[in-house]
Image (tube, rainbow, N blue to C red):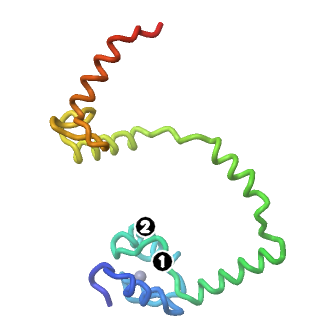
Amino acid sequence: MRETPFETIKELDAYTGGPQIQCLECGQWFKSLATHLPRTHGISHNDYRQKWGIPKRFALAGTATREKLSEQMHSYIESGRLTYDHLDTAVDAARTAGRRAKTPIDKKRQSEMVASIRPGDHSKLPPGAKLADGRDAEKRREYQQQYRATKKPHD
Ligand SMILES: [Zn+2]
């Protein structure tokens, strides 16, 4: 049984390519790890994926379960039980919904991330920095400040 996270796609294909899938926590074989992981080991699928380096696109189920679910879906579509009639309205709703407001946790995490990438005053580029088009960032800022000073403030 594995001791270290997966490192190659080939290893992952081999791990998820059989009719059954082995739980890397206890070594038992299952059709799917969907219920086994949280019930027996008390860990979420995401934690398991993170621990063993399994990307989302690899199902935590053997081929037997995946084929069965695929057949089931196809039969739902053929019988009309599953339709895509709602897609147009769902897409419209998603497009007009706007972006979710950031939670305090999101904001804190983002500011920590920015601070770790660019320590100090991260609202300004560091001295001598170049913009994406190659211009000097400081000169650009000076120019902007002068330009703004010439404009009348809004009321
Ligand atoms: Zn297990």
For the N terminus, give its image quadrant: bottom left
Q: Quadrant of ligand 1?
A: bottom left
Residue 70, percent from left and from top: 66, 81
Looking at this view, is 141 or 76 the one in front? 141
Q: With 147 as the anchor, is 45 left or right in this view?
A: right
Q: Amino acid at mark 1?
A: Phe
Disc number for residue 58: 1
Outermost residue on the left side: it is: 127
Task: Kindly report which numbered mark, 1 or 2, lies closer to the viewer in this rendering.
Answer: 1
Residue 105 x %, y %: 38, 42
Q: Residues within 10 Å of mark 1 (few under 14, many from 20)?
A: some
Q: Residue at x 23, y 41 (%)?
A: 130
Label 2 sits on residue: 46
* Mark 1: secondary structure: loop
Please determine whether, in this image, residue 74 is positioned above or below residue 18: above
149, above or below 9, in the image: above
Q: x%, y% of residue 24?
A: 37, 83
**In-front residue for pair 93/21:** 93
